[in-house]
Amino acid sequence: MSKLDLRKELKRYYTAKKKPEVIDVPSGNFLTIIGRGEPGGEAYTAALQALYGLSYTLKFKCKAEGRDFTVMALEGLWWWDDPGVFDVEGAPPRSWGRGGSHGSGSAWRISCMPRRTR
């Protein structure tokens, strides 16, 4: 049984160059969780555990069916709702929730690419 290893296959997209360049990244299937609050906080940690738990459950199910693959590394994005926040040290409090006083906190998205689109 051959093993799909996207780390090797897509190495060009994960290797930094000395000079920045614009690239076209191929489409793929991602498991993604979007949330709000402190990266590293309770909600983020729970989401991360769920993401990797599901990724590896899918991996071992596919492996048992003869379609093994390498689970890609975590990719994460963090941002604040206020586009004027450039200084992380002076950013508004990061809080979990929606609307009201929670609307100015940070948000995040973590993704894991278990396999490519075919």
Image: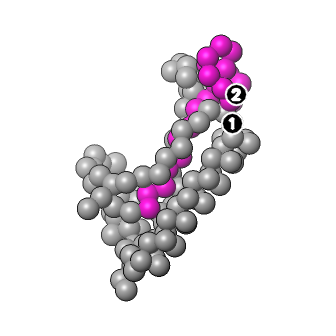
Q: On the image, which quarter does residue 18 sit in? A: bottom left
In this rendered view, identify the residue nearer to me: 89 or 101.
101
**Which residue is situated farthest in the right direction here?**
42
Q: Mark 1 and 2 residues: CB-CB less than 8 Å, in contact?
A: yes
Q: Secondary structure at mark 2?
A: loop
- The color scheme shown is one colour
Q: Residue at x 66, y 26 (%)?
A: 97
Q: Is residue 11 visible?
A: no
| Label whose residue precedes the other's in the sequence (1 or 2) | 1
Query: In this rendering, would 115 be left or right of 21?
Result: right
What amino acid type is highlighted by mark number 2? Ser
Residue that label 2 marks: 95
Q: Which residue is mark 1?
A: 38
Q: Which residues are magenta?
A: 88-114
For the C terminus, the image quarter is: bottom left
Residue 13 is at least partly visible in this image: yes
Where is residue 53 drawn, in percent x and y? 60, 60
What quarter of the picture does the N terminus occupy? bottom left
